[in-house]
Amino acid sequence: MCEKTDTNLTKLEKCMADLIAIFNEEASKDGDKSTLSREEAIHFVRKELHCFLQEQGASDDDIMKFIDTNASGNVDFQEYCVLLGGLASSLREDLLKMRRKK
Ligand SMILES: [Ca+2]
């Protein structure tokens, strides 16, 4: 694996570094940066992913059921990645439908 610095990262690698930085920033608010606590996870989703929730009117419990897939009471980095992958896939489908309608 080649040595990576901020200056030689590809566009995709920079996106991934940003996703990691966002998780670390959100997860470290309570002192334990390995996971998002319930409060951190709900705050993160409502702040960063509010467009996805507006149509659904999701409660805090709905959010946790959706993202805390192993029902541990917090959200680890793997669950965070699954959430983002699922949302990206859903967003892609929506964008494709919008293009077909034009
Ligand atoms: Ca969990």
Image (cartoon, rainbow, N blue to C red):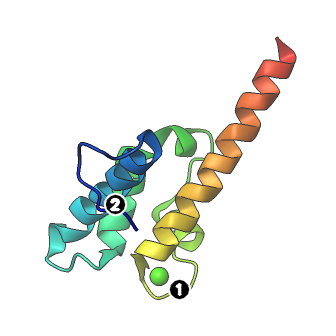
Disc 1 and disc 2: Cα gap in Å?
Answer: 22 Å
Of 18 and 10, nearer the camera is: 10
Q: Give the SS element for disc 1.
A: loop
Q: Residues within 10 Å of mark 2 (few under 14, many from 20)?
A: some
Of 59 and 92, nearer the camera is: 92
Q: Write the residue at 59% across / 67% down.
A: 66
| Residue type, label 1 | Ala
User: Can the viewer see residue 92?
Assistant: yes
Residue at mark 1: C-beta within 8 A of ligand 1: yes
Q: Quadrant of the C terminus?
A: top right
- 66 left or right of 5? right
Q: Residue furthest left?
A: 31
Q: Is residue 36 above or below residue 51?
A: below
Q: Write the residue at 71% across / 30% down.
A: 95
- 18 left or right of 76? left
User: Can the viewer see residue 62?
Assistant: no
Q: Write the residue at 77% across / 23% down.
A: 98
Number of the front mark, 1 or 2 = 2
Q: Quadrant of the N terminus?
A: bottom left
Q: Is residue 27 above or below residue 72?
A: above
Residue 37: percent from left, percent from top: 32, 76
**Residue beneath label 2, please?**
20
Q: Residue furthest front?
A: 2
In the rendered structure, which disc, 1 or 2, sits on the residue that comes first in sequence?
Answer: 2
- 1 left or right of 6? right
**Residue beneath label 1, please?**
71
